Structure formats: structure tokens, C-alpha cells
Image: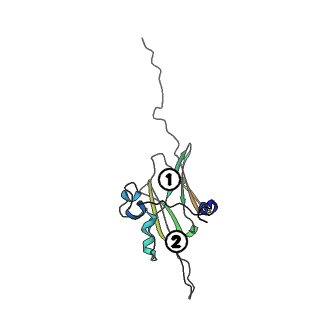
Amino acid sequence: MRGDKRMTSLVPWRGGGLDHWIGSPFSSELWDPLGFGSRDWRRGRDDDVSAVALASVDWREIDNAHIIRADLPGVRKEDVKVQVEDGNILQISGEKTKEKEESGERWQRIERQRGSFLRRLRLPENANTEEINCALENGVLTVTVPKKEATSTRSDVKQIDIA
């Protein structure tokens, strides 16, 4: 079935070549020497301590708010904390708990992540941290940070004629 394109389309491409064995100079690990953002850092480990990771986020700005989304699959609402520290640091943290194991079970493979996660983002000056809203739906945390109303720096504009 080697030439069967239907089979190969089901298998995700994970890269290849020598980079798999010796590493790539262009990989994110170069910029993350401790491996906290790398999924490979936890591969093959069973202990919960190894699952400490940074939560990946998307941040977009619209006219009246900043919208921050974090993928948190399998994390329950009560296991997530969203806080503002020092007036403008948004912190998203929590823990994906380990499933209850039944005695006599024999696991063949454990790939799903579990353990603690943490992400801190510095909010801009126009963020209204008093009105932040959060929702966790289908494994995606959405944090809406409204913008403060723009205050004009010029209260009065006076036209000056040129002579």
C-alpha cells in the first residue's frame, strides 16, 4: 500500500531528514533553550511535573477591545484562573488534571498533555482591566479586554491665521 495516497493523507507529516535526529538550527528550541514551549520536551515522560508548559495564545485587536484566545483542550472551567497583576499583566494559568486510572489497566500510549500551564501577557495602556470578560467554550478560552475610551490630549483647538 506504499503508493496508496489515501493512506498517506491520513498520516500527519512530522518533518523528516536529519533535523529529526540532530535538530535544526532554525527550530524554536534555539530560542527556547529550556524547552518550555516545546512539545518534545515532555514526550515520553509520565510524571505530571514534565507537563508544565506555556499556553499558546492568539491576540487580535479590534476597534473597541483586545481579544485573546488560548487553546485549552480538556481543561475544565474550574481549573482555569485568569488574573490581572500589577495593573496590566494578564495571567492565564491552570491545570489539566490526570484521568483516574483503573487498576489493572495497561496503557499502550500516553500522548495527551496534562499538568500545569501558565501564560503572562503585558496589556497595553489602553486596556480597561476593570471590564475583562472570559468564556471557555469547546476547549478555547476567550478573554475580551475592552479598550479605555480615548481621551483627547487637545481639549481646544484654536485656528491661527497665517499672515
Q: Secondary structure at mark 2?
A: loop
At x 37%, y 63%, the residue is 22
Position of 27 relative to 75 (above/below): above
State the residue in front, 43 or 140: 43
Q: Secondary structure at mark 1?
A: helix
Where is mark 2, residue-wise?
A: 111
State the quadrant of the N terminus.
bottom right
Residue at image location 41% in from the left, 60% down from the top: 19
Q: Which mark is residue 77?
A: none
Which residue of the protein is positioned furthest toward the bottom in this rendering? 104
Name the spot of residue 71 as percent of width and height, x first.
Answer: 55, 61
Q: Amino acid at mark 1?
A: Thr
- Residue 75: percent from left, percent from top: 56, 68
Identified by mark 2, the residue type is Glu
Q: Which residue extends farthest top?
A: 163
Q: CB of mark 1 within 8 Å of CB of mark 2? A: no
Q: Earlier in the sequence, mark 1 or mark 2?
A: 2
Q: Which residue is mark 1?
A: 129
Q: Position of residue 54 (x, y in %)?
A: 45, 62
Q: Residue at x 42, y 67 (%)?
A: 41
Q: How is the image coloured?
A: rainbow
Which residue reaches farthest right?
Answer: 6
Q: Quadrant of residue 45?
A: bottom left
- Marks 1 and 2 sit apart, C-alpha to C-alpha, by 37 Å
Residue density around tag 1, few if under 14, some if 14–19, many if 20 or more, within 10 Å: many
Q: Place residue 42 in its image quadrant.
A: bottom left
**Which quadrant would residue 20 be assigned to in this image?**
bottom left
Mark nearer the viewer, 1 or 2:
2
User: On the picture, is 104 further left or further right than 159?
Assistant: right
Q: Nearer the viewer, residue 129 or 1?
A: 1
Quarter holding the C terminus is: top left
